[in-house]
Amino acid sequence: MRPPSAMSLNAAILIKVVSVLLFAVMSALVRYVGEAGIPLGQVVFFRSLFALIPVVLIFAARRELASAVRTSRPLGHLGRGSISVVGMFLNFAALSRLPLVDATAISFAAPMITVALAALVLSERVRAYRWSAVAVGFCGVLVMLWPYLGLGRLVTAGSAESSVGALCAVGSAFTNAFAVIQTRRLTDSETTSSIVFYFSLICTIAGGIIVPFVWQTPTLPQLVALIAVGVLGGMSHILLTESYRYAAASIMAPFDYLTLLFAFVIGYAAFGEIPTVYAYVGAVVVVLSGLFVIWRERQLAARRQRLRSGTPDSPSDD
């Protein structure tokens, strides 16, 4: 990939920041409807159904709808969609039970889990530097989880609820990592548009199967929030993909951590949440570990580029 121009890089950063902001607002709305008692299956259904609207409109405007529908690997999409449905349930369960910053921070364990799975499932070469970053990152996650997993909390009703939320957040991070691995497999033959389209479609079908059994008629504000969850989720996904048209993923990835800042501001303004010292310390450790992994990925990508161009390079321990 050619180095991005200053204009294209600025455009990519702006698009990525908007994507991250929309995702943070969507998470806050999920928290709102969860606290209101809207069943998870109903939230998943609205998130998936109304995400299809911007996805279909934008792909149609780009004349990419045919390529989005066309696929040679329906079972691969079904596998990724199924993993994503489970991850969505777990993520929404965590958001409805934990402070917004805590749920968001724990979710950033996913990139480190992806590194481990890439080595185990895809046989990618992962050596000392990145394994060390993964280990340190998991220590950060344990720091964030510490207040939720004490025996005293597990026998207290209100505390048990937050402990379940913490476990759901960890489960969501694992399913997100598995979804990334499955996406890497699909990109060998499938277009980005087809991956996005079938993700939304399969999640909508799964939510549609569940929603008749759990339906709770929402109030008007709750209905607006449910629709907004879907539209914002779809727009965030599209903008995320669009940002990678202008700059490499390794350049864009650090901006994901702005989600923590947005979650802190929205959590405080909307729900009066003040993070604990465990959340601050654990989040810093996880973010620094994640940024190190990203930096190392960029370093290795640059090294591979030099080797392809025939420029001599010293051995490097990954």
Image (cartoon, rainbow, N blue to C red):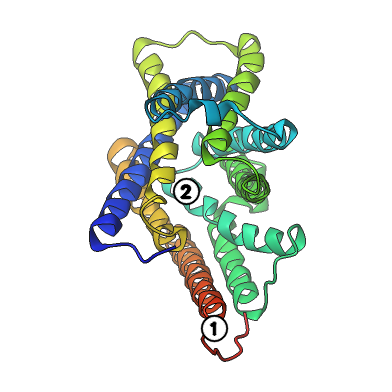
Q: Mark 1 sits on what residue?
A: 310
The relative height of residue 92 versus residue 139 in the rendered view (above or below) is above
Q: Mark 2 sits on what residue?
A: 104
- Amino acid type of the residue that numbered disc 2 sits on in the rendered structure: Thr
Q: Position of residue 118 (x, y in %)?
A: 69, 60
- Closer to the camera in the image, 132 or 75: 75
Tell which residue pokes out farthest to the left in this image.
7
Q: Which mark is residue 95?
A: none
Secondary structure type for disc 1: loop
Q: Position of residue 230 (x, y in %)?
A: 44, 25
Q: Position of residue 249 (x, y in %)?
A: 46, 58
On the question of residue 158 being in view, the answer is no
Secondary structure type for disc 2: helix
Q: Position of residue 69 (x, y in %)?
A: 58, 26
- Amino acid type of the residue that numbered disc 1 sits on in the rendered structure: Gly
- Closer to the camera in the image, 49 or 258: 49
